Structure formats: C-alpha cells, structure tokens
Image: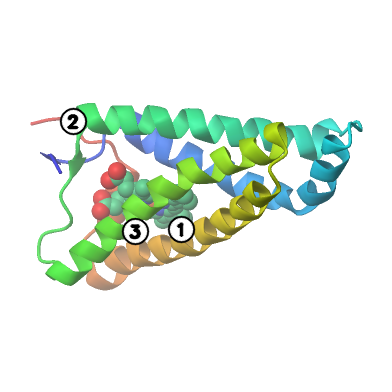
Amino acid sequence: MPGTVGYRRVQIALHWAIAVVIAANYLLGDDMGRALRTHLQGGEVGLFPAMMHVWLGLAVLVLVALRLGVRLILGVPEAPAGDPELLRRAGHLVHVALYVLMIAMPVFGVLAWYAGIGVAGDAHEIAANLIMLLAGLHAVAALFHHYVLGDGLMWRMLRAQSRH
Ligand code: HEM
C-alpha cells in the first residue's frame, strides 16, 4: 500500500458521500422486495422509494469506481504507527471487505432489478446487511482509535492533507 501523509480532499469527500448514500439506501430498502415483485411482473413502481433506491445504488457503483481510481493514483496513508500487527491486518481486511461489498452489493441489486435473477436479490440483501455490520465495526474502531487511544485517527477522514 503506497504510503502518503493522509487522505486528500477528494478521498474524504468520496468516503463521506458514499457513507451517506449507502445509509440512505439502507433505510429505503425496506419496501424494495415488494417493489421488485411489482417491477418484474411489469407493474409500475413509484419514484420513491423504489426508483430512488435504484438510482442511489447505481450512484454508489460510480462513486466507488471513482474512489478506487483515485486511490490507485494518490495512494492511502499507512495504519497508525504503534498499532499491533494483528490490528493493522484486521483494519486492512475490513477496508478490503468494505470495498468488495460496496461493489458486489449494487451489482447484485442490478442483476435482481434489471435481469430478474431471484438469488441476486437475496445476495444483495445479505451484502447490504454485511456492509452495515462491518461499517458499524469500522466506525467504532475509528472512534476507539481517536478517543481511547488518543491518536487523532478521525482527523484523517475530516481534514485533508497536502503533500509535503
Ligand atoms: C460514522 C461512520 C464512519 C466513520 C467514523 C469512518 C471513519 C473512517 C476513518 C477515520 C478512516 C481512515 C482510517 C485510516 O486511515 O486508517 C476510514 C477509512 C475508510 N472507510 Fe470509513 N468511516 C465511517 C463509515 C464508513 C462507511 C459507511 C464505509 C463504507 C461502507 C466506510 C469505508 C471506509 C473504507 C473502505 C476506508 C479505507 C479507505 C482507504 O484507505 O482506502 N467508512 N473511515
């Protein structure tokens, strides 16, 4: 992983934009099972929440692709110095899992909505729940670092770093 001094403004903007869109879509997800059945039977579904959920899901896909492209170009900072090796690895693993799920979840959604593949709908739901679980764990870990270990980790995702 390339070592940089911190996240850049565009990386921070993408992190929080994706977090907000995913949280909003999770809240809209409740009625989607019914909407999917109506849609696959050729019925009309409303703009809200069904189509909004579909468009926000597609937006996640675009934003994550952008984010990975930016990551490839700008790199990311190392895990905080002094973290035990096991924690560094766990943190890295959670980040990788979140990236995989952030791609897999909307792709499964697209396969369910546009191709009518039933099992993709189930996989979409499982991926969404897993994201919530891992993102919750990830947020608790970040806050633990910041407030308990006192290493100021949260500033990395709040304040952009310029290169030295
Ligand atoms: C309140 C919620 C959240 C907080 C407090 C938070 C905080 C942070 C912080 C501080 C970092 C930097 C960690 C480091 O540099 O070692 C980070 C990175 C990251 N966050 Fe979050 N985050 C939140 C929500 C989310 C959500 C919802 C997702 C995705 C679904 C997410 C995905 C990621 C990923 C993939 C990284 C790694 C970025 C990289 O290095 O490429 N985060 N987050």
* Near-viewer residue (143 or 39): 39
Q: Which residue is mark 2?
A: 162
Query: Height in image: 130 above or below 164?
Result: below
Q: Which residue is mark 3?
A: 94
Q: Disc 1 versus disc 3: distance between alpha carbons?
A: 9 Å
Instruction: Please name the residue shown 65% across and 55% down the image.
Output: 122
Q: Is mark 3 within 8 Å of ligand 1?
A: yes
Q: Is mark 1 within 8 Å of ligand 1?
A: yes
Instruction: Please name the residue shown 64% across and 45% down the image.
Output: 24
Q: Are marks 1 and 2 in contact (CB under 8 Å)?
A: no
Q: Residues within 10 Å of mark 2 (few under 14, many from 20)?
A: few
Q: Secondary structure at mark 1?
A: helix
In the shown orientation, is residue 39 left or right of residue 131? right
- The label nearer to you, 3 versus 2, is 3
Image x and y of residue 52, in percent = 72, 34
| Sequence-first disc among 3 and 2 | 3
Instruction: Please name the residue shown 78% across and 50% down the image.
Output: 33
| Sequence-first disc among 1 and 2 | 1
Query: Height in image: 148 above or below 99?
Result: below
The N terminus lies in which quarter of the figure? top left
Q: Secondary structure at mark 3?
A: helix
Residue farthest to the right? 43
Q: Quadrant of residue 150?
A: bottom left
Mark linked to residue 135: 1
Q: Secondary structure at mark 2?
A: loop
Mark linked to residue 26: none
Image x and y of residue 157, in percent = 33, 45
Amino acid at pointer 2: Ser
